[in-house]
Amino acid sequence: SQASTITLHLQQTDNQLSMVYQDDGKGFDLKHQRQSSNGLGMKNIESRAHAIGANIAFQSGVQEGFQFRLVLEHPSQEEVAEGTAPST
């Protein structure tokens, strides 16, 4: 990707964990990459995110770097303590 800077931001709220990865690399045409068989890296990230019940969104453009945001909802500590957490 020819990135010189990579940023990884993690944030946890009471019932959500989010991770944002961003780089300043050369980027790519996201639509073309999804249609190509060469996009296995993104497909693997997406598959693993869905396997743990997370949502994921990708963003990129030629000469615009690459970014993805992963969000995983989880029960709050209060819901767990009260026994009202949704079952999985």
Image (cartoon, grey):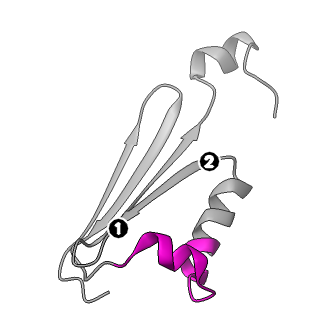
Q: Observer-nearest residue: 81 or 38?
A: 38
Residue identifier under label 2: 54
* Residue occupying image coordinates x 61% and y 33%: 74
Q: Amino acid at mark 2?
A: Ala
x and y percent of residue 71 in the render? Answer: 51, 44
Q: Earlier in the sequence, mark 2 or mark 1?
A: 2
Specify the farthest residue to the left: 4
Distance of label 2 from label 1 (alpha carbons): 20 Å
Q: Residue at x 65, y 16 (%)?
A: 79
Q: Are marks 2 and 1 in contact (CB under 8 Å)?
A: no
Q: How many marks?
A: 2
Judge left or right: residue 46 versus residue 21: right
Looking at the image, residue 71 lies above or below residue 13:
below
Quadrant location, the C terminus: top right
In magenta, the rendered stretch is 28-43
The local secondary structure at tag 1 comes to strand
| Residue for badge 1 | 60
Please say if 10 is above or below 8.
Answer: above
* SS of the residue under disc 2: loop
Q: Is residue 87 above or below residue 17?
A: above
* Residue 5 place in picture, x, y as percent: 19, 75
Drawn side of residue 56 relative to residue 85, left or right: left
Label 2 neighbourhood size at 10 Å, few (<14), some (14-19), many (20+)? some
Q: Is residue 88 left or right of residue 46?
A: right
Q: Is residue 43 above or below residue 57?
A: below
Q: Nearer the viewer, mark 2 or mark 1?
A: 1
Residue furthest to the top in view is 82
Find residue 16 and report its horizontal and vertical position in percent.
51, 34
Q: Answer whether residue 85 is magenta in the image.
A: no
- Where, by quadrant of the figure, is residue 22 drawn? bottom left
